[in-house]
Amino acid sequence: MRLRRAALLTTLLAGLVTGAAVPPAITGEPPPGYEPLKQRGVVRGGSGPVAAAEVTLFQAGDRPGAGARPLARTRSDAHGRFTLRYRAPDRPDAVLYLTADAAPDGRRHARDGRWVPPVRLVAMIGTRQPTGGVVLNERTTVAAGFSMAQFTRHGEVAGRRPGLQNAAAVAHNLADIGDGSVADVLAAPPNGDRTSTLRTVNTLADILSGCTAGETCQSLFDLARHPGAPPPRETFQAVADIARLPGRRAAELFALAEGRDAYVPRLTQAPDAWTIALRYVGNGHELDGPGNVAFDAQGTAWIINNYTFRADPRLPACGSRILSRLTPTGHAVPGAPYRGGGLYGAGFGVTIDPGGRVWAANFGFQGTGCPLDAHRLYRSVSEFTGEGRPLSPPGGWRFGDIVQPQGTASDREGNIWIANCGGRSVTRVPDGDARRARNIAPGGDRLIKPFGVTVDTRGRAWVTGNGSDSVMQLSPNGRPLRSITGGGIKRPMGAASDSLGNVWVANSGAVVAPCEGTTPAMVAEAIESIVTRHVDASVTLIRPDGTTPDEPFVNDGLFLPWGIAVDGDDTVWVANFGGHRLANLCGARESACPPGLRTGDPISPADTGYSSDGLDRNTAVQVDPSGNVWLANNWRTVPLQTNPGGREMVVFIGLAAPVRTPLLGPPRPL
């Protein structure tokens, strides 16, 4: 009998990962012979333990709109301590989280016909049971609210995999639920005291502590309220609402932290927006000039690099031979980075096809003094399996007259589109069969320095002509259809399509795409003279029929726009090579924008965008399945060095509507 019970307990503990049954209720005795799991913890506020809080263990809903399921419930004692007993979920990927509801002022507020307390502290457990106790405090609530911002409605968490699971894991990059302290990722370089993110998290926690103390709840809820929506009724939902619209009433929210110092260090002045941006570096010695990123079906990030990592930036910048792959939490995937397949000096082109194969365009970046001749290496594309095994030969795939390739995209049929920046042409790889690749050259001056490429809802490809101030539209089989000019298209770089059939173009206004030159010095010559000036920076909307508004969209959040992306709500995100800022514009689906905004209006602060001292000069922006916005720190902002490559991916947590990945043309909501 003892052996039988021990085997049963082992099975139940494994159930957190491998599955076990969920009880029909959260109260009462477990079935005979069943030993429940146990979770201990403590509820703390900025001023000390929170007694008599109603503590609930929830299983998050598995789709939008599905209610979270309570697994166990109890109350904290006079010291804030609690113990819960529960049966493990039957799904190995079930996301668990703890809430602690309290009413420090003795009052309760109406919600859905019942009375609830205004303070809800949260700790995201995720898919694995903690080995020890759990602390719920204001800092863990900020971590949960931002990471789960796109999955939280009415104080409950629900969403689809893998976005929900990945978001829960990201919460542990911000706060350590074991003791309520700052998580290691946030506390250490390249984060920590090198950026303001740690101070931002602590200041937000101090803002919540005023409500936990029973003093500022109503002010917090009023300030966190979205236009046209009811105010949040408790602190966790307030944090999620702030995270989704962080530029709203930022200074007034900051004032709520005055006189509070439970969480230090903290900000000394109000930010332009309450964004949380983390720097990710993988294994710490691989990213150098990251150019772009693509996400696979699991939400892992595949990143191409311009240069070989050098700890000393004064050494020659030779072309990168690796393909980086990071987990959704920014760590190197075991076995990554990957090599081979002709990979060398990739630039802006990386995509993942419907079969999960990864394609990287070898632009041939390298500096002087490198052992290889880049001119023999800029005519190829590399192909890898979803496990990182190269499928292309040592010299890469060279069919289809590839020359200095930049933007690369896959459509839903598995066709690969490559913009030949040095060749006035586009290479189409039908069905991902590189040996059948075909070169498409519209002829004349209709497409000069093709740089970015995207695919619309009809399978048509749109290619930006950086040197021709145009965008070329191609039929699904590659036939040139029309060349679009006007609408403010000037030195266009990236392009992105939305679910309504529109195409959005980032107009640098002045940056000449690096096509003829591949060395850092040549690239610098094209950009350094104008990087400190706003020059006709804008975004152009191209409708499905090829027409454009008379004027492009402009605001001071745009500063040398480069990469561009569209999220699951069809709002538009722009990476800026200058200004240390991320811009967010209302898209063509105005119902998804804050009330009163129209297509092209800035959602981010119009004068600064979402600024961050974690950003350098950014080439690419993409949205992952958790709603995190990733930017490539491609080029350092220090004076020119032999190796100027940036070293980080910068990730804004919970800021955008999640998308299904891999991205095969227009975004699809998760």
Image (cartoon, rainbow, N blue to C red):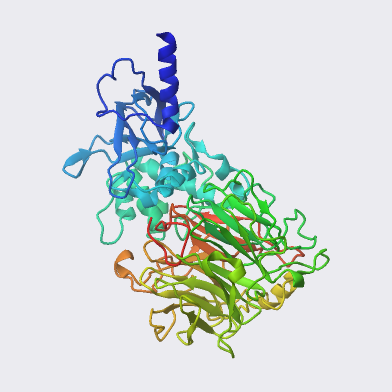
Residue at horizontal 34 percent and vertical 37 percent from the top? 59
Q: Give coordinates of residue 601: x percent, y percent.
A: 38, 73
Q: Give coordinates of residue 449: x percent, y percent.
A: 61, 80
Say whether residue 291 is visible: yes
For the C terminus, the image quarter is bottom left
Answer left or right for 120 relative to 559: left
Residue at horizontal 40 percent and vertical 53 percent from the top? 243
Q: Nearer the viewer, residue 261 or 579?
A: 579
Residue at horizontal 51 percent and vertical 47 percent from the top? 266
Q: Nearer the viewer, residue 441 or 219?
A: 441
The correct choice, above or below, for 577 with respect to 144 in the image is below
Q: Nearer the viewer, residue 493 or 41?
A: 493
The correct choice, above or below, for 502 with respect to 315 in the image is below
Say whether residue 580 is visible: no
Answer left or right for 653 relative to 72: right
Residue 590 falls in image quadrant: bottom left
Residue 186 falls in image quadrant: top right
Residue 458 falls in image quadrant: bottom left
Answer left or right for 404 relative to 590: right
Q: Give coordinates of residue 519: x percent, y percent.
A: 74, 71
Residue at horizontal 52 percent and vertical 42 percent from the top? 264
